[in-house]
């Protein structure tokens, strides 16, 4: 859309982040108007979706007014862009709740580094998005509310960045922050039909909770388009070049549709969507070969050890740990045992990375479904037992942990739909391939465009 058309448009809802920033930099629209319009959309639609835990209405408008007078506004890559922050990193002046009544309602004194980078780039934080308690599960419901899938309000938005994914899918914001320990960006991205990008180890500052689940967790991006994902990734990583990734060369891609986890089964319709996408990739000049991805028992047990122990570390820092939900308390108890026995070993991640690298010799990327099924029900998980949540988590999301445990970059992009619900394609790259993944996402979006946001009513 040309700037002249942007200036004449009555609303900014549904605009890409890049379009908003370009218009604000040129003075074609006021950041105050951008924020006000998005806040109106949140007020109208979010009561049914539940994406936001907390909306910063007046504060966001004040910050937009300050930005409007910024002397160097024309140099800000995210000038005036509304953004949502997952409620598991500090935002100055707001409480950090992590989906739990066991946390403190005191305001955080300073921004997390990724929030600082977004603000410095000109973004306006509209609010904090809903998460499951301590960000442990791939479904976002709990004592502080439920994030629903904009495609079907009876379905989950995924987790643990479910609120951020729902906010982007519904057009409440064009981009949102998420974090990812075992798939918590990519799983909700797939459930809600948006882009979810996680970097490799050390590319974006982590510092999530009490040790980032012993290194598994990282901060990343949820966005409505590949271009917006690349723009936000460039800001979070402090690497401007990521904003304009090159179109990828001919790639060798390993396609694995069968679950790597024993007992979890990929829904046939999901596998069929991935096979169709493989044909699109071949049409773009890439080679796609079938591949069997296996997660050894030792690797799976080490992943569980990190997950359990990370939760125990986070719970130890809580104000009122006795207020945790029963499923969380059991998870934390398992984590304490894991820590006591010394079962979290850094060498396990190194060994898995080496093994995965050897398995993928001759390939540039691994392609799997992001989730083995479409999104399950939105509610009821917080009331169910720990074992029921564990089984459901493995059945829904068995693929994504392989990238976290190896410390590799990965991205989920919309691949198609099944029975009216989105299906995600999950690409895992080698170390340093963040730009390659973003470039491939852009190539796929150009070849087969997906909806920028779920139509509103």
Image (cartoon, rainbow, N blue to C red):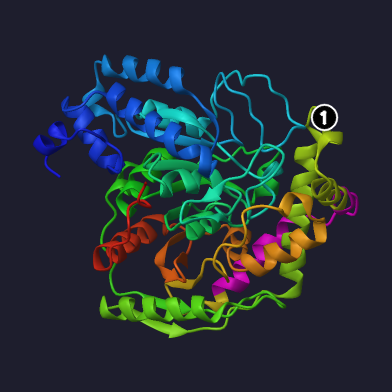
Residue 77 x, y percent position in the rendering = 29, 34
Badge 1, how many Cα within 10 Å: few under 14, some, many 20+? some
Tell me what residue is drawn at x 46 percent, y 56 percent. Answer: 151
Tell me what residue is drawn at x 43 percent, y 76 percent. Answer: 273
Query: Residue 84 or 78: which is nearer the viewer?
Result: 84
Q: Is residue 240 magenta?
A: no
Residue occupying the far bottom of the picture: 290
> Relative to 284, is 375 above or below?
above
Left or right of residue 105: residue 43: left
Left or right of residue 99: residue 51: left
Residue 219 x, y percent position in the rendering = 53, 44
Question: Which residue is tagged 1?
Answer: 320
Residue 16: in sight, yes or no? yes
User: If the image is split into quadrants, where does the N terminus sit?
Assistant: top left
Tell me what residue is drawn at x 65 percent, y 48 percent. Answer: 215
Residue 18 placement: quadrant: top left
Disc 1 secondary structure class = loop
Q: Is residue 343 magenta?
A: yes
For the stretch drawn in magenta, the main secondary structure is helix
Query: Residue 266 or 293: which is nearer the viewer?
Result: 266
Residue 6 placement: quadrant: top left
Residue 402 x, y percent position in the rendering = 60, 65
> Relative to 422, is 138 above or below?
above
- Point out the stretch of residues depicted in magenta: 336-357
Query: Residue 381 or 249: which is nearer the viewer?
Result: 381
Residue 429: in sight, yes or no? no
């Amino acid at each position: 859309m040309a700037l002249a058309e942007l200036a004449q448009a009555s609303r900014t809802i549904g605009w890409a982040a890049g379009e908003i920033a370009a218009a604000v930099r040129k003075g074609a629209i006021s950041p105050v108007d951008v924020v006000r319009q998005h806040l109106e959309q949140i007020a109208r639609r979010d009561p049914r979706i539940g994406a936001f835990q907390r909306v910063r209405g007046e504060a966001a408008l004040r910050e937009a007014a300050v930005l409007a007078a910024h002397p160097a506004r024309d140099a800000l890559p995210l000038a005036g862009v509304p953004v949502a922050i997952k409620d598991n990193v500090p935002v100055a002046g707001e409480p950090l709740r992590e989906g739990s009544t066991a946390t403190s309602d005191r305001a955080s004194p300073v921004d997390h580094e990724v929030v600082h980078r977004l603000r410095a780039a000109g973004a306006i934080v509209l609010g904090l998005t809903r998460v499951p308690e301590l960000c442990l599960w791939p479904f976002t419901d709990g004592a502080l509310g439920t994030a629903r899938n904009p495609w079907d309000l009876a379905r989950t938005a995924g987790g643990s960045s479910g609120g951020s994914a729902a906010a982007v899918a519904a057009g409440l914001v064009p981009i949102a922050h998420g974090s990812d320990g075992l798939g918590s960006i990519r799983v909700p991205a797939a459930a809600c039909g948006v882009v979810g990008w996680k970097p490799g180890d050390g590319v974006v500052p982590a510092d999530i909770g009490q040790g980032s689940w012993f290194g598994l967790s990282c901060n990343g991006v949820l966005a409505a388009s590949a271009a917006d994902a690349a723009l936000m990734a460039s800001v979070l990583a402090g690497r401007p070049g990521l904003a304009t990734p090159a179109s990828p060369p001919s790639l060798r891609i390993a396609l694995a549709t069968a679950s790597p986890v024993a007992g979890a089964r990929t829904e046939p319709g999901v596998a069929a969507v991935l096979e169709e996408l493989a044909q699109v990739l071949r049409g773009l000049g890439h080679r796609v070969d079938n591949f069997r991805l296996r997660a050894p028992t030792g690797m799976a047990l080490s992943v569980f050890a990190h997950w359990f122990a990370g939760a125990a570390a986070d719970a130890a820092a809580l104000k009122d740990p006795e207020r945790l939900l029963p499923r969380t308390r059991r998870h934390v108890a398992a984590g304490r045992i894991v820590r006591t026995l010394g079962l979290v070993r850094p060498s396990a991640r190194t060994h898995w990375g080496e093994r995965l690298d050897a398995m993928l010799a001759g390939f540039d990327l691994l392609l799997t479904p992001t989730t083995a099924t479409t999104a399950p029900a939105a509610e009821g998980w917080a009331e169910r037992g720990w074992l029921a949540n564990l089984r459901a988590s493995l059945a829904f999301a068995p693929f994504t942990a392989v990238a976290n445990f190896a410390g590799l970059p990965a991205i989920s992009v919309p691949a198609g739909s099944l029975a009216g619900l989105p299906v995600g394609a999950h690409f895992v790259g080698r170390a340093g391939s963040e730009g390659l993944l973003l470039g491939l996402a852009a190539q796929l979006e150009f070849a087969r465009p997906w909806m920028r946001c779920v139509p509103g009513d």
